[in-house]
Each structure stands twice: as structure tokens, then as C-alpha cells.
Amino acid sequence: MNLHITSYPQSSGPEELVPSRYALKIGEIDVLVVSDGVLPLPTTMLAHNAAPAERAAWLHDMFLPQDAFDWALNAVMVRSGGKTILIDAGLGSDPNLHLPRAGQLIKRLEAAGIDLSAVTDLVLTHLHMDHIGGLLVDGVKQRLRKDLRIHVAAAEVKFWEAPDFSHTNMPQGFPDALRATAKRFVSEYGNQLRTFGETQEIAPGVVALRTGGHTPGHSVVRIASGDDALTFAGDAVFAVGFEQPDWHNGFEHDPEEAARVRIRLLRELAATGEMLVATHLPFPSVGRVAVDGDAFRWVPVFWDY
């Protein structure tokens, strides 16, 4: 299977009026960014430590609504060294949270001609439900390989044994849903987990690196081949995090450390010119980072047709 060719839709239905997958090559490695949909959240989630007037000004400058807006949800498929790797698994379905426009990943993988049984490895940036919920959708586990390897930082699994939400700022219902989803996931997939400490090579040129911050075991995935490289940053970077890297996101369990991780990662990417993809940047979220004074600037790539 060549993921590079899957950017051309096999069919289109009336419900899919916008692109939901984007293919690119990182050297000899095939990469496919797939949209899991969008997640409407209150704008206070962007920066609960910012003055309301400053947050409102940023939203105004970005032509975004003041009360709530749609966060993108992105996952990535990778082919390297004979392995087919899925990085994060989307939200899945939680009817209690009323999020009908999210949880589209499984359907969109099917539309791209990707059989779940072809996935040899799964890398989880962390165990928040919008990164693992797709694995808990009815019928999905039965379609996955019995020998599927699920890679996640050991610190992340440990954290969810007794998670601390004291520094988060989430809408009502989310902490309980996050706890329940993580607990169910570990119960159902625990025997397939392959935990790592700080780094783990998943396939040639595909390496997971623990960053911490957002959650204690939060990790990013670097994909490199030849002169090309791309980092999937998970939840280390949000749209507001370029101009305001010190603003605290409501889902960050250690917001001060998350800000340090974000700034360090953005500095590295600005220095190298490598590409960046992140879970909650607008689809397809492929871009680069530039230094802009004391902050940063996101430079989206020109789409390659």
C-alpha cells in the first residue's frame, strides 16, 4: 500500500464536501494526515491564564468567534520499513459529550482505502480520549491485528492510574470522561502496550520522544528520511501557541511545563526548518515555524497537488 496515492478520493459523498486527508513524502517515507473532524470548545480553553481582553483581542485578530470555535482533530498514517503506523486514533464516539462532528477517523481511513488490519503499529502521543477513543468504537478491536504493537510512554500509563486534574481548566464532564476512557482503554488493550522511557524507534526514521508537559507521558513523533523531516507534535502546540506560547491550555495537566516544552520544540523547529503537524492545528496542519520577535509564527505549506 502506497499512502502517497491515497490523497485522491476513491468516491465522494454529499456529506464530505471538504478534504479530509492529505498525503506527502518525507524522503522515502509515506505520510498521510487524516482529519478526525472538529471539536467545538469554549474559547477560554485556549488560555485560561490570559486576561479576557487579551484573549478576546487575539480571537478578533484571527477572525474567530468569541465564545466557542472548532478545534481540528488530526491523526497521521506512516509507511516505513514495511510497517504501517497510525499515530493517534481520534475521539471515537462518546454520546454523553454530544460531539457529532468528531470521531470520523475510522470512516475516513476506510475512504482512503486503508484497512485497519494493515496497521502494524500504533503510537499514542498521550491517553486523552481524543487520541485513543477511535480504538474503543464498536467493532474496531476485532478488525485490528492480534499482534498490533501500541507504543506509549510508560509515564503516561502510570499517570492515568490516578490522574491529577488540579491544574486543568476543562468544561464540565470532561475530566470524568477522560478518566473513564483511559481506564477502559488500558483494560482492553493493556496486553498490547509497548511502553518506553524517553525515546523509542518505531520504524526506520520514525521515533517517538517523550516531552511531558501536556501530560506526564506526552510524546511527539519525529519522521525523518534523507534531507526531509516532520514532527507530529500531538498536543504540545495549539493555534494560539505560536504568538502566545506562554498561554495555558485548559487540557494541560502541568501548564507551566507544557509552555516550556512548547517553546523548546518551536525553537528547534524554527532552527531546523522541519515541518510540523499537530493534532489541533487547522487541517491539514502541515507547516513550518518561524521566529517572530519573542514569539513564533506558523507558516502553512502550500498544498502540493
Image (cartoon, rainbow, N blue to C red):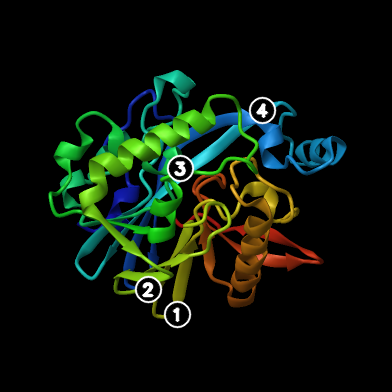
Instruction: Work out whether residue 289 or residue 204 is closer to the camera in this orientation and state it.
Output: 204
Question: Which label sits on residue 27?
Answer: 2
Residue matched to label 1: 227
* Mark 4 burial class by Cα count in 10 Å: few <14, some 14-19, many 20+: some
Secondary-structure class at tag 1: loop
Secondary-structure class at tag 3: loop
Secondary-structure class at tag 2: loop
Residue farthest front in this picture: 162
Residue matched to label 3: 128
- The three-letter amino acid code for the residue at tag 1 is Asp
Residue matched to label 4: 68
- The three-letter amino acid code for the residue at tag 3 is His
The residue positioned 55% from the left and 44% from the top of the image is: 164
Per the model, the C-alpha gap separating discs 4 and 3 is 20 Å
Confirm whether residue 18 shows in the render.
no
Could you tell me which quadrant the C terminus lies in?
A: bottom left
Query: In front: mark 3 or mark 2?
Result: 3
Could you tell me which quadrant the N terminus lies in?
A: bottom left
Pinpoint residue 169: horizontal percent, then vertical percent.
65, 36
Left-right relation of 47 to 203:
right
Q: Are marks 4 and 3 in contact (CB under 8 Å)?
A: no
- The three-letter amino acid code for the residue at tag 2 is Gly
Q: Are marks 1 and 2 in contact (CB under 8 Å)?
A: yes
Residue farthest left in this picture: 146
Quadrant of the rendered image containing residue 144: top left
The residue positioned 49% from the left and 43% from the top of the image is: 163
Query: In front: mark 4 or mark 3?
Result: 3
Quadrant of the rendered image containing residue 280: top right
Per the model, the C-alpha gap separating discs 2 and 4 is 39 Å
